[in-house]
Amino acid sequence: MSALSKYISYYKDVLMTLYCSLKGNFVASMTAILRQMEDYHYAHLIKTFGKMRSDVVDFLMETFIMFKNLIGKNVYPSDWVIMNMMQNKVFLRAINQYADMLNKKFLDQANFELQLWNNYFHLAVAFLTQESLQLENFSSTKRGKILNKYGDMRRQIGFEIRDMWYNLGQHKIKFIPEMVGPMLEMTLIPETELRKATIPIFFDMMQCEFHSTRSFQMFENEIITKLDHEVEGGRGDEQYKVLFEKILLEHCRKHKYLAKTGETFVKLVVRLMERLLDYRTIMHDENKENRMSCTVNVLNFYKEIEREEMYIRYLYKLCDLHKECDNYTEAAYTLLLHAKLLKWSEEPCAAHLTQRDGYQAATQGQLKDQLYQEIIHYFDKGKMWEEAIALGKELAEQYENEMFDYEQLSELLKKQAQFYESIVKVIRPKPDYFAVGYYGQGFPTFLRNKVFIYRGKEYERREDFEARLLTQFPNAEKMKTTSPPGEEIKNSPGQYIQCFTVKPKLDLPSKFHKPVSEQILSFYRVNEVQRFEYSRPIRKGEKNPDNEFANMWIERTIYVTGYKLPGILRWFEVKSVFMVEISPLENAIETMQLTNDKINNMVQQHLNDPNLPINPLSMLLNGIVDPAVMGGFTNYEKAFFTEKYIHDHPEDHEKIEKLKDLIAWQIPFLTEGIRIHGEKVTEALRPFHERLEACFKQLKEKVEKQYGVRSLPSTVDDRRGSRPRSMVRSFTMPSSSRPLSIASVSSISSDSTPSRPGSDGFVLEPLLPKKMHSRSQDKLDKDDPDKDKKEKKKEKRNSKHQEIFEKEFKSTDISLQQSEAVILSETISPLRPQRPKSQVINVMGSEKRLSVSPSPPSQPIPPPITPRAKLSFSLQSSLELNGMNSLEMTDIPPPLPVKGSVADYGCLTDSQESVSPATSPPVPQRQLPPPLPSKTPPPPPPKTTRKQTSVDSGIVQ
């Protein structure tokens, strides 16, 4: 028996091989026989089966299946056009002959054969949609010859299918919804007359189901599912969408019961087709962002109509796109939408819920567990530890109280502990946000005449973002204004892109009802935001050359997106826009409030962490108390505290009092800040601190005399309990191509204001100096007889400093990998060794830049220095100057950006020896007498007419 089985198997293989080699001959012979047959031959063929009805059914079933197989797998090569067309012509005549037999013998109620009719429809649709009959794929010459000789066989068989469908009568309901897909495939053929003839079949299906069940839900679900697959596969176009809407709406509106529900359904399908056509257009586009937008449009549509299977399908398409672009945060939010559809239960998983092979889950609870693990992993990679912790808590509850899986609970809690540590120790770069408007008819429908808010990448400047945007649309023209365009541009055939930076508006969660670390709050300043603002100064009335603040208004535009950022996309459409105007007085109040908040935040940081560097505090205090920058303070007095203004604006009385109160409250904050500065200041910075104290003393006397005395409780933040404390251990700077001053850098860790110029058009920030040096300081020494000599030496040293600094920076430049978190620890990098004190700072330089305030005779005389010695910091010795000589940095500290000028660092070393790696002998000190006390208050700063925005001061100068 074994040998016989092997022989039979071998014989079958030989026959199959022989058949494959001779298949073309067999098909050619059969085609020749059928070609010779007339109508009476087909009738005689059926009669030969006698009265055996089952034999006729079997014959027709086998014939239909054979024809369908031959059509699906062409025997002849595709370029054998004549053979293929001849075969199709013969098959078409045979199919029509057998269709007549179906109408005559198998249509009545007693003899109806559902499967036989079903096979006929599938064969007819397969014949109509075969590749060799799609004439639009041929050249115009070949297409003309085929039409002249054979005609358009698609139209012939399509009309036959329509007639056969209408002949079914009461049997139509038996083919719904199974025949919806094949009929849709037929109507999508790009032949106008065929479409007009066959699209009404859909209304007939709706009508049949409605009469049977009082709804057409099965038909609706099936056509939506099949339409998605067909359009994604390349079928359908704009003309089909128009014809579908027009024909079905005409039929529905004539129907008594389907007028309303039918019209709703038609518009629903048209909306779906719009999104699917957009998606198909950009599906193979290199621009993944456009693909993401279209994918979200489709999945939102499926969510709206509660098509869960299709919704999940597009969720995973979107997730895959995000992972390709390393958008791990967005990938996590996308998967979270799937997880929210599941329950923590033992309910079995439906097939559509587990569309990925990687998930092995029998219940919804198991699948949700696996999804949460993956989502937490993506949130960790995206440095969104707050979101990972929230999910971890929910998962821990299940492990502890439902699953009792303590091993998994232990691992999860370890991860959470690491997340908490990362929040307070790892510096996360703050992304910028950009408003982008796409205007003109040249853009696709999902972008056309819409405004979006984009979340920039880490350290991405607006210029880089714009370049990336214009690369995607090379024909687009960049608009030079931030005002909304008119209808002329919106209706033009071109492409216009408008792009500018906006500032996220902080929306703190309700749980933060007490002082919180700034490192914790900094997350919410750029995350979970939905409102964004763009401010620009405008002038009303005549320009006041003496004081620009008197008529400087702020026009603030608020943009509200449809969803919070970040989310399942890095951008969302703006859903509402409104504008408010900030009066000059309100602008002054806002600026003073920001200043006070900034001082308080900085004080709390140093109270909580004594190891913080002192440099940002030094710059902040100096920018407020130094007479060189008291101009902003004085400008408010000149603009709003005059009798004329108070008389002309009686309604502003409360606001004026509020501004005075804010000015008065600044003194106790500064008192605490200077006290901390005095405790932490190094001997090298002692002259600088003494000058701060002298300047502050004058400021305090003036403010307390004019606006009263304010005092803080035992701790600075008791009065202002809502202000956060900070535990930031260090501050970082963006990449070297984005120079920042030290004062700007300090705002990165202590304030929500942007760190780059022009980051929100017009930045309202606390009063800070843009540079340590100012013209007003020069006036303090106008009686200096050696002024000319000093100026010459100063110019020489400035150029020398720039040389030294660039040389030193190149030697210490260490690239920062964006994908790696910067963790602060107490280890000194071997690449940046600590420097001896003798090389840290040279306070004996001859440049006269910092004036030491006079002290009473009873006080000890400060170390002998020149009256206006320049206070300088070197790059490598900044640890000493920041009060961090005992601290140690990480193995690879964050890189410092290359500065555009020496002044960007605020304070630089005075001599080349301070940056030399070798120890240099101490510079001999010149014994100079202490400066004489000044009998007159410092003069006000010179008037300026500049209209630019200073990032450090937040005031238009």
Image (cartoon, rainbow, N blue to C red):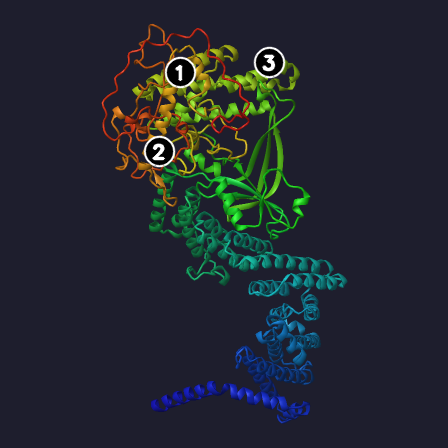
User: What residue sits 64% from the left and 78% below the top?
Assistant: 145
Mark 1 element type: helix
Q: The disc labelled 2 sits on which kind of residue?
A: Glu
Pointer 3 or 1: first along the chain: 3
Viewer-proximal residue, 345 or 926? 926
Q: Report x, y in % for residue 112.
A: 65, 81
Disc 3/disc 1 C-alpha distance (Å): 40 Å
Q: Which residue corresponds to mark 2?
A: 806
639 left or right of 710 in image: right
Q: Which of marks 1 and 2 is nearer the N terminus?
A: 1
Dot 3 falls on a residue whose secondary structure is loop
Eyeballing the image, is 412 above or below 693? below
Name the mark nearer the viewer: 1 or 2: 1
Number of marks in the image?
3
Cα gap from disc 1 to disc 2, whole angstroms = 28 Å
- Ranked by sequence position, the earlier of labels 3 and 2 is 3
The secondary element bearing badge 2 is classed as helix
- Please, is residue 133 above or below residue 563 in the view? below
Number of other residues with Cα within 10 Å of mark 1, as a class: few under 14, some 14 to 19, many 20 or more: few
Q: Mark 1 points at which residue?
A: 788
Residue 317 visible at all: yes
